[in-house]
Image: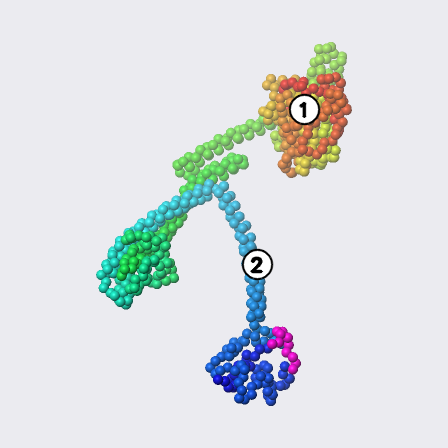
Amino acid sequence: MKAPVDGAAAGIAARTSVDLREPGRAAPASDAPAAGTPVTGAPGAPTPGTAAPDAVEPGTVAPDAVEPGTVAPDAVEPGRVAPDAVEPGPATGAPRRNGPAARWHTTRFRTRLWVKRARIVGVRVARLVRIGVAGLLPGLHYLLRSVHRKWRRSLQFRTVLTTLLLAILSFAVVGAYLSNQIANNLFQERLVQAESETRYNVKQVQDTFDGAQVTDQSSVITLVYDTLNAVEGRGSVIQRRYVFEAMPDQTKPRNRWVESRASDQLTISVIPPELRKSVQDSGKEQFWASTEFPVGTEDRPGIAVGNKVTFNGTVYELYLIYDLNTAQQTLDEIQNVLLAGGAVLALLIGAVAWYVTRNVVSPVSHAAVVSEKLAAGQLQERMVVKGEDEVARLGASFNHMAASLQEQITQLATLSQMQQRFVSDVSHELRTPLTTVRMAAEVLYDAREDFDPINKRSAELLYNQVERFQSLLADLLEISRFDAGVATLDAEPGDIVQLVSHVMEGVAPVAAEYGSAVSLNAPSDSIIVDMDDRRIDRILRNLILNALEHGEGRPVNISVAANDDAVAVAVRDHGIGMTSAEAARVFDRFWRADPARARTTGGSGLGLSIAAEDTKLHNGWLQAWGSRGSGANFRLTLPLRQGESITKSPLQLEPVDVGLHGGGSARTMLLLDHSPAPRADSADQGAGSGSGTPGAGTAGAGTAGAGTTDPDTARTGTKEGS
């Protein structure tokens, strides 16, 4: 049958026409309508008065004609775009293919665009998170530091926090135990009730199935439905649901019209596989298992109890599911009550602990404050005593102790002031008569050659003792200035190496008298120090003279070194030495290691004490080391700039002696440390002659006098601070 060609068929043909031009290529000029020419019909339609290329003559059938009532294969539904339809380009007006490839390219472009947007959002979110963490971490660190500082410094905070933590831990343990016991009891109660009711209901179901006289399908289905519905919801407390399922792997009889049934649209999947396996493998035993089943949009806990029943020769699995949601709600309420009660009780315990510790710690804190004030010199401070308890007795005892200390300190301060004033007054009063006596002694000493031997010796003794008395009086006056607090420091920048050399020149005659060589190990460059030249000169002179006096004719080594903030001068002798206990007391006033206090050696006994006071004025260190038979080492450490503190001395206190061999048996002992490279000093000056006899030599500035000595000739002796 041939379909007539009408306007509808022509329209369909026009809509399903395919443009075979390549995508993106513009249509030829001949295909475009002329300007001002109206367009009639679809694109590609013939102009009026001309025949279409595919026109069909009347009476013939078009090759692609469609029968009435059928749809053309390539027809496009109204409102949809043909797969290969060409749309004009957005910019140039060129045709654009809207086929699968174009949709794929569009989808891929949109995917890349969304990926880029997601990356931008991720970067911004990460930046916000990083900014938030960067702002949160300092606050967290500050909080932790504050808690740690409060923990270390406050006994009350530590006690209250410890009490709270222990209380919370105890409540957590007790609450967990109670919650577990309550949950077990509720579950066991529901389980016993469920098992009892299941046995009863399963027996009723089995009796109903055994006594049923039904043979048709509708009667069987009705019987099963009514019997199971009677089981559902029959419990007094727990609402029951059922799942009725024929056991697998059994011969299906002809009259088995019920395969499975369940209440509330439950399925056999809510039954645990272990429970099903136990029921299938058993005879008439009853099994149970905990499970969860959906009710509406939530999952509720429950107990599934399974049995077997038989109906019309078919064995079925019957599971009754008991809802435990009511028990779970009861347990949740109990847990909430326990949690709230524990929190309130913990706060109450914390408040009680704070109040108790405050009553106990407050007097202790007050006692600490009063003690600090007493230590600062405010001897009139006392504790406030209230009541008659232990804390009150502690306060009263503390006040009594403070009053006793104040009285003793006042007495000692008064006695000390009297002693200082006495020494100062006596020293000043003795200056005038001592000057007169000294002048007379000098006259007698100068004329001693005209006296007989006895009077000559008396004149010499008088002159020497007057000189010693003069030195002692000068030391007493200096000590009195330190005690009165009127000693001042006149510090100016100066070269300490040059000062050491100057002191060595001054003590050269004494070194020659004792037969000891004095060597200097110092940097070649100058070391500028803010110091009082007069006081440092006195310190170094005391140290060197002390070393010469107790060096037993052996060499005395002087080392100078500096670091970034300090300079050190060490005076090392190899004489009789001293013990560590003696080194600890060597700077005490009038202290001597010789119990007999013989004055055959040593000065007034105040030289090292004055040196220590001068060092304190410079904010420096003066330390001593000694070993019996190995000599002693005194180290003076000063800050390079006035007002600064010392962290480490450039020279070590305990010396390390290294022998540098020279010609023959002569050698010089040097004191080494981790300091700038010492200047190489010549050991050729003042070399003595004779093995084992100390060589006398004088040491000038920057030069080293070396004497031959035998270290094995050291003997035990007495060390004193002169």
Task: Kindly identify which numbered label has been placed on residue 573.
Answer: 1
Q: Which residue is mark 2?
A: 123
- Give the secondary structure at mark 2: helix
Residue located at (63% from left, 27% from top)? 625
Q: Amino acid at mark 1?
A: Asp
Viewer-nearest residue: 165 or 469: 165
x and y percentages locating residue 248 in the rendered image: 34, 58
Magenta-tinted stretch? 20-30
User: Few, some or many C-alpha atoms within 10 Å of disc 2 (few <14, some 14-19, many ≥20)?
Assistant: few
x, y percent for residue 379:
51, 35
Q: Is 49 rendered above or below residue 314?
A: below
From the viewer's perspective, tell me whether residue 444 is left or right of residue 18. Answer: right
Nearest to the observer: residue 157 or residue 219: 219
- Give me the residue at 63% from left, 83% from top: 33
Is residue 550 left or right of 360 when viewed as pictured? right
Please state, as top left, top right, bottom left or bottom right, where the C terminus lies in the image: top right
In the displayed structure, 228 sits above or below 493; it is below
The answer to which of 449 and 603 lies nearer the viewer is: 603
Q: Residue, x 30% and y 58% (percent of image)? A: 316
Q: Main secondary structure of the magenta part?
A: loop
Image: 173 above or below 400: below
Q: Amino acid at mark 2?
A: Val
Tell me where residue 708 appears, x and y as whole percent. 73, 20
Circles 2 and 1: CB atoms closer than 8 Å: no
The quarter holding residue 485 reads top right
Q: Quadrant of residue 672?
A: top right
Disc 1 element: strand
